[in-house]
Image (spheres, helix red, strand yellow):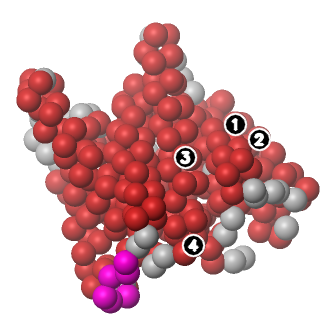
Amino acid sequence: MGLGEALSILSALAWSAGVIIYKRLGESLPPMQLNLMKNLIVLGLLVPSLAVFADWPPPTLPLSDLVITLVSGVLGIAVADTLYFRALNQLGAARTGILGNFFSPFVILLSFVFLHERLGPIQIVGFVLVTAGVLTVGRQTVTDTVDRRAIRIGIATGIAAIFLMAVAIVMVKPVLEAQPFVWVVSLRLVGGVTAMALAYAAFARTAPSTSQNRGPIPWRTLLAGAFVGQYLSMVLWLGGYKYTRASIAAILNETTSIFIVLLAWLFLGEPLTRRKLVGVGLTVSGVACMLLA
């Protein structure tokens, strides 16, 4: 297993834990406010990371790389994450997890068009197995708890979020490969937080009643979600894309849905059914194909 593959799998595990935390946070915080607050916390966590891990003095990025990094943050953090949290509130974790299956096809398509990447036969088999496993698990966990219109809106919102995440990571991958990793991560987050702060300020002026949180802010849960579901998963996620091909990292990220099933069983008491076990087996087999190819 290469470093990039290991980081991609660990990123899926961290994000899965974050999804469970974010679902609970969504009960008291609107999507935009939740996204802004948790990324401000992450930005604070990155300051000591820069002091310890970054090369000093800071690199001088070409203007094109700087613009790409900031735009990637706006699309992938400010816009995509906010839409994802909105979909999470509308659909629940199960349906939103299923929509995550669109991520690797989007990345593979964009990588094919813009990065000229290709998958070998065994890796294609791995992709099929991972997708089959995730869909098997997802079909078991979906329940009809909201009306059809809300489902349609939530699905459209979720797909838009996943597509923007794919666009953001594919566009910044060449910069990740050419520039110091920690600095690119930090600049990307600065771009996202700046855009969110401006949008939230404008939104608060135009709709102050709906921009307020729906209850006391659960700071401990918010700190845990920001660290595990954003800081840790983001660093691992971007590290995976830095050290392996974008198409490979995207497929390994699909194990997120499997981790969600296992974490729900361990921490929420949800049953681990035979169908879920079959899905886990398919996904693990697919990951093995990806790693052995």
Mark 1 and mark 4: Cα distance apart in space: 32 Å
Mark carried by residue 135: 1
Instruction: Tell me if label 4 and label 2 are in contact, CB under 8 Å.
Output: no
What's the amino acid at mark 4? Glu
Instruction: Please tell me whether mark 4 or mark 2 is closer to you in this view.
Output: 4
Residue linked to disc 4? 177
Q: For residue 59: magenta?
A: yes
What's the amino acid at mark 1? Leu
**Mark 3 vs mark 4: which is more N-terminal?**
3
Instruction: Please tell me whether mark 3 or mark 1 is closer to you in this view.
Output: 3
What's the amino acid at mark 3? Val
Looking at the image, residue 88 sits to the left or right of residue 100; the answer is: left
Mark 3 and mark 1: Cα distance apart in space: 23 Å
Q: Residues within 10 Å of mark 3 (few under 14, many from 20)?
A: some
The stretch in magenta equals 55-60
**Mark 4 vs mark 2: which is more N-terminal?**
2
**Residue 29 image point, x, y percent:** 22, 37
Residue linked to disc 3? 167
